[in-house]
Image (cartoon, helix red, strand yellow):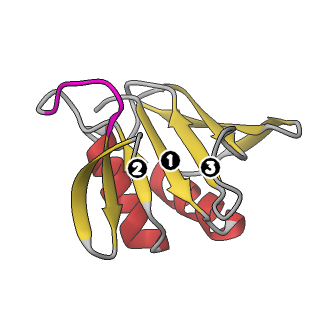
Amino acid sequence: MADCEIYLQNPEMTPMIEWIEASVGEMDWISENEDMVVFHAIAGGDTLPIIVQKEIAGTELSEKIVGVWFNSIHAPWESDADCARDAFKALGCTVQCDPGDAVKGEDKFMQVDASGESIISLAE
């Protein structure tokens, strides 16, 4: 297992939070401000902080990008890519993440959407 970070395009917040809780188990709401919400769950006998960044700065006005970081080696996925695949399957919105060690280079992301999986450049 690994810590995981994904970026979701235009997710509905309630289903997204329900997916997170279904994935990690019962969560406690810790704090919230205009930028983020922090939850804690228990995984591997330790606290699993989950940070939901409500909107990533610098994105186009037509899309809202929400970041989700499972900040523990006890996140329930082996990789960011596994987490992204699971999020897409559950929520149906486009998900991006670090493509992993197999793809080297800056500004490269894996994208999972209705057309499948692809490696994209953030400059696209």
For residue 66, the mark is 3
Q: Which residue is mark 2?
A: 96
- Residue at 46% x, 44% y is 6
Outermost left residue: 102
Q: Position of residue 122 (x, y in %)?
A: 41, 40
Q: Position of residue 56 (x, y in %)?
A: 66, 41
Location of residue 104 with respect to 34 vertically, above or below: above
Q: Which residue type does callout 3 highlight?
A: Val
Return the residue nearer the eye: 67 or 61. Answer: 61
Return the residue nearer the eye: 63 or 123. Answer: 123
Q: Of the two numbered discs 1 and 2 on the same chain, state the one appearing first in sequence.
A: 1
Element type where label 3 sits in the image:
strand
- Residue at 57% x, 55% y is 21
Q: Is residue 115 left or right of residue 31?
A: left
- Residue at 80% x, 37% y is 35
Q: Magenta stretch containing residue 106, yes or no?
A: yes
Choose top left, top right, bottom left or bottom right for residue 17: bottom right
Q: Which residue type does callout 1 highlight?
A: Tyr
Q: Which residue type does callout 2 highlight?
A: Gln
Q: Is residue 5 left or right of residue 111?
A: right
For residue 7, the mark is 1
